[in-house]
Amino acid sequence: MLKLKLKILIVIFLFIYFIIPPMIIIANPLKIIKVELFYVENDLNGNISKINFRGTIRWAVGKILNFRSKINIKNIRPFDARNPFNISGDVATVEFKNDNIVYLDASLEKTFFLPISLTAKYFFNDKEIKPDEILKNKANLNGTLRIEFYARSLQTYLKDINYQKFPDNSNAKISTNLIIPYIIIITNNSQINIASFRDIEVTSGTKYFFGDNININLLMITYPDAKASITFKGNMKNLPSFIATCSPLNFNIPNQFLDNIKNIDNALNTIYQNYQLMKEFLKTIIDTEAQIIEQIDIFYKTLSGLYPYISSVNDLLNLYSANLEKVIKLNNAFLQILKDMKDYLSLDENMYQKIVSLFELNNKLIKVVLEGVIIEEFKAPGIYDFPQIIDLGEFTLKNTQNILIQFNEGSKLIRDKLIEVKSIFESYEKDVIETINNLRIEREKAIQIFQITPSLLDYIIFIIRDFEPEVVIERNVQFIFKFNFEE
């Protein structure tokens, strides 16, 4: 749950940022722009057959720049002859003589580590189908084709996470593997004519119309996994190809994002405090029930020897009726809190009604003792009736004793059930504490992740900073997968 909210909060800050092509920027003597693009050629299942690297470094004419490479630098070639570079040892030197840009090119092994994987599965009329069957028979396929894309971040970093542990806010530390999230935008690589399909559905993305054509943008964020799908309804003869562009999430965390996490923390803290209040209510009710059970036992024994001491009963009656009325008030207060907190507690309706019925039964039993009950046209008196009927004699007292025995047994049963309810609320309390601590850990993890991700923008090309300190380096890296359905 907490991972899904994290994705929703950050996606609105990323979509525009990564769609804008990083290379459409003019030369600036105080800014170096480096772009690394990895073109992954794969079959329709996502199995890699070839990886090509294309890089660009843009600076001002007349500048000299040195860089190193993660791979053997001799395998990196200039894409054209406008600005060739010289290699000495493990350092390449570019002199921007003729243009303000240099193009880099390299072929990489299929085993070259990519920080993200992207695969696809295909379902025709809800039955899985192999992609080569689609290619062979797409002109004759008429129905519903669903393409499911699966992505996974493969890059992790073992880090210590320091946070304040709830509820005492003590300092705590855990070691965990930080997962680097990637944003993936899948778009159609060829025109989709409106007339080609009866309908197209996308999950976690958009489709928009441009004249007679439809364009698709499918958005995924891996943390660590992501899944999305496109569904085509109609004839598959004009099925388009798709391009998937993958980039690491890299931006300064907005204050609003951190504030939202803090607001969730505060809301959960409020829920926790309400749990504490409800637990105290339950404890008070249980303790009062125990006192009543004990007092009814004493009352029963007092009634047995009441006859020579009948004048001493009135004081006991006042005490018992006051305690019983107190329990009714506590029960009603607890039920009101339970109603207000029902949605936050995630209680299902069945459990909620059981708890309500339990407390209502308790109130009814108490009212029987206080007000009496009619049994076969005979009224067994309640405590309220005692001042008027205390002289009615032994027969009335025996009937009252029977009612007290039944009440006491019922009260003991309710007390035991209340203890069970209390244990349920204590388990919810543990869940709230765990959720708050997980949220605080996720917040610190997010901060560290976004401190790490800028370093990932130097994936194989590392510029040597031996130039003016005021020059900044703007870096971009993208991994581009293609799913080709065209002839």
Image (tube, rainbow, N blue to C red):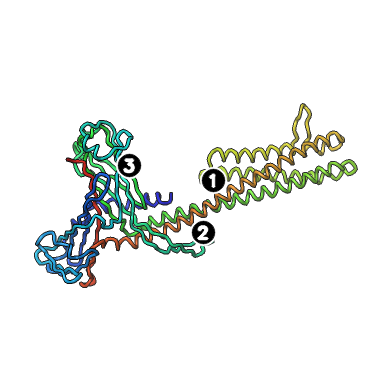
Left or right: residue 97 versus residue 194 is left
User: In this orientation, which residue lies closer to the viewer: 52 or 258?
Assistant: 52
Left or right: residue 337 versus residue 405 is left
Amino acid type of the residue that numbered disc 2 sits on in the rendered structure: Phe
Q: Nearer the viewer, mark 2 or mark 1?
A: 2
Asked where in the image residue 100 lies, by quadrant, the reply is bottom left
The mark that comes first in sequence, 3 or 1, is 3
Give me the residue at 39% from left, 52% from top: 6
Q: Nearer the viewer, mark 2 or mark 3?
A: 3
Task: Compute the Cα span from label 2 to label 1.
Answer: 21 Å
Amino acid type of the residue that numbered disc 3 sits on in the rendered structure: Thr
- Which residue extends farthest top? 377
The mark that comes first in sequence, 2 or 3, is 2
Crowd class of label 3 (few under 14; some 14 to 19; many from 20; radius 10 Å): some
Give me the residue at 36% from left, 61% from top: 157
Task: Compute the Cα span from label 2 to label 3.
Answer: 37 Å
Residue highlighted by disc 1: 341
Crowd class of label 1 (few under 14; some 14 to 19; many from 20; radius 10 Å): some
Q: Nearer the viewer, mark 3 or mark 1?
A: 3
Image coordinates for residue 421, horizontal then vertical, percent? 61, 45
User: In this orientation, which residue lies closer to the viewer: 250 or 29?
Assistant: 250
- In the rendered view, tell whether residue 19 sits above or below residue 406: below
- In the rendered view, tell whether residue 129 sits above or below residue 245: above
Left or right: residue 357 versus residue 90 is right
The mark that comes first in sequence, 2 or 1, is 2
Residue highlighted by disc 2: 166
Residue highlighted by disc 3: 203
- In the rendered view, tell whether residue 246 sits above or below residue 236: below
Asked where in the image residue 254 lies, by quadrant, the reply is bottom left
Task: Compute the Cα span from label 3 to label 1.
Answer: 34 Å
Crowd class of label 2 (few under 14; some 14 to 19; many from 20; radius 10 Å): some
Specify whether residue 11 is in view.
no
